[in-house]
Image (tube, rainbow, N blue to C red):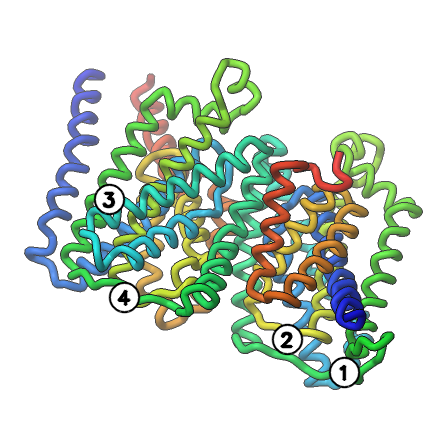
Amino acid sequence: MVVTILDVAIGGIMLGGIYALIAMGFSLQYGVARVLNIAHGEFIMLGAFITWTLYTVLGINPLLSLVIVGPAIFIIGFILQRTLFTRLRTSSPSPGAYEASSLLAAFGLLFVIQNVAILIWGADIRAYAYLSVPVNLGGAIFAANRLVALLFAVVIGVVFYLFLARTRMGKAIRAAAQDAATAGLMGININQVLALCFGLGALLAGVAGLLISMTFSFQPTMGLEYTIIAIIMVVLGGLGSIPGSFIGGFLLGLIGHIVTYFEPGLTLPSYYFIFTLLLLVRPTGILGK
Amino acid sequence: MNIKRVISRGLFSLGLPLLILILLATLPFYAPGYTAILLSSIFMYVVLTVSWVIFSGSTGYISLAPAAFFGVGIYSSALFGNELPLGIVIGIGGIASACLALLVGALTLRLKGIYFAIFTFGLVMLIAHLLLFWEINITGTRGRFVVLVDYNTIYYVMLAIMVVTLLTSFLIRRSKFGSALQSIGENEEAAVHIGINVTMFKVIAFAISAVFTGAVGAIMATRWTYIDPFIAFNPLYSFMPVLMAIFGGMGRLYGPVIGAAIFSYLEEFLITKFPYYYMLIFGIILLVAILYLPDGLVGLVQKLRRRITGGKYANTGR
């Protein structure tokens, strides 16, 4: 019994770690760059597939390919924000109109990325075995890759938080999140900062994809479900709050894992149940204003 | 001269749709059977797109729920198609969808628009998962057969639903209700201040748009013969109307119709041969339309017309 509880709890925290990265990335893109990035899950998928290709074709250690996957996806995100979304932002008459048109543009991206991925990698479900040796944690047994994934998720999350809280660039990002126009007047290159945020958001998604590929199976159409989960996590933590999304991610991972233990078919409905409850009781989320 | 122009224009805008309607109504008598099948697909997309525009086009709230209503219609057909006559089944599909819309609308439409978009985005997947759970654990089935209906009946029912949808959309555009929706889209706070009950108007418009989507789902199911939760609740049917409406342009009633017609025709040819390329093209066109055609084909036509007539006026020295 104790072992079962431990099993579910630790498993939930491990899932939560990956979820937290996804949620932080999404929150950064919505909270600062004002793009409700429906294509977020596609960056996760890209991360997973690039890692898989590097591992199976070139034999590169998945953890080592972090330094390839991260920057590659960051650049894609950065360029997208600099070209597509900046153009939309400057041509939109109001922030509300930009929110709508960027949502629709992200929609288009979803289709482009997903189908390019299918054309490159095929539509099959993939998986590979890496660090799958069992580790015993007080009676509960886990694959080592899950522990490594959790460790990486926490380290990346903390580093990221410190970057936002302590550095000059982080301060600029927080200023842009509060009021982009005023931040621009204070001498912050707003296009650069927003592009950085979108790129970093994509990077976090890509890294989460890398960690997912080590522990779960993946396929080109998996993005949509992760995006839905990301959105719910971010609402749970408070739309626009990055620490909130980190907490929301862990919380939902834990809840999801517990529900999956009892009834896998109800995982997504349980997320939605939480979401509905939240909308009724506290739409601003845990840490929202 | 002006009066003459107004009259001829009135005749044109009344006569042309009537002529098209007569042509479409008599079509099965002279055209090959395949044309009717192709046209019923086009009608389906026209209904999906126009009903999406009824709500989202005017209020600016992006609904990603059409597939949910469509699926509810499909399931109504699967559940009641064997016992009840077709007309009643379609009615059930429409009403059930409207009830779902009322529920979702009451829950999310009092909040900021972004919550609505978010909620509707996952709604389709939620229902599909719940239904699958229900079918596996409670009824012990997976998937259902739908009663068959011949192609001509489908064609005429589809045509009728499309005509009603277009008429409704036309009348809403002309009514006070439509102006209220428009003002919500332009500035919601101002709309509140001039005394519009914005939440109620939004919820009602959302429910109206759901009725037609559900009805068209109920009739379309009879063509598919076999359905399961993931066939019925396919997110694609949420995405298509959005693309078609944006590509066609929402400023005029004919915009979404043209957008839907072009894309369903394209789909018919491409999706069986190159499904992934089709979806890729779909995404690229959406991006291009958002970037370069913010008002869709309608906006393009209006711009061209203004340029031509503008030139004429300049020549006559006015």
The subunit letter for the residue under badge 4 reads: B
Residue A68 shows in this picture = no
Vertical position of residue B179 compared to residue B122: above or below: above
Q: Residue beneath label 1, please? A: A132
Residue A241 shows in this picture = yes
Question: Dot 3, how many residues are within 10 Å of its Cα: few (below 14), some (14-19), or many (20+)?
Answer: many
Q: Residue at the spot x=28%, y=39% of the render?
A: B165
The subunit letter for the residue under badge 3 reads: B
Of discs 2 and 4, which sits in the foreground? Answer: 4
Q: Amino acid at mark 2?
A: Ser
Helix, strand or loop for disc 1:
loop
Q: Are marks 2 and 3 on the same chain?
A: no
Q: Residue at the spot x=78%, y=34% of the render?
A: A178
Query: From mark 2 to mark 3, how far is it between C-alphas?
Result: 44 Å
Nearest the eye: A69 or B89: B89
Query: From mark 1 to mark 2, how far is it between C-alphas?
Result: 13 Å
Question: Dot 1, how many residues are within 10 Å of its Cα: few (below 14), some (14-19), or many (20+)?
Answer: some
The subunit letter for the residue under badge 1 reads: A
Q: Residue beneath label 3, please? A: B161
Q: Residue beneath label 4, please? A: B225
Query: From mark 3 to mark 1, how far is it between C-alphas?
Result: 57 Å
Q: Residue B85: x and y, percent?
A: 18, 52
Q: Residue beneath label 2, please? A: A217
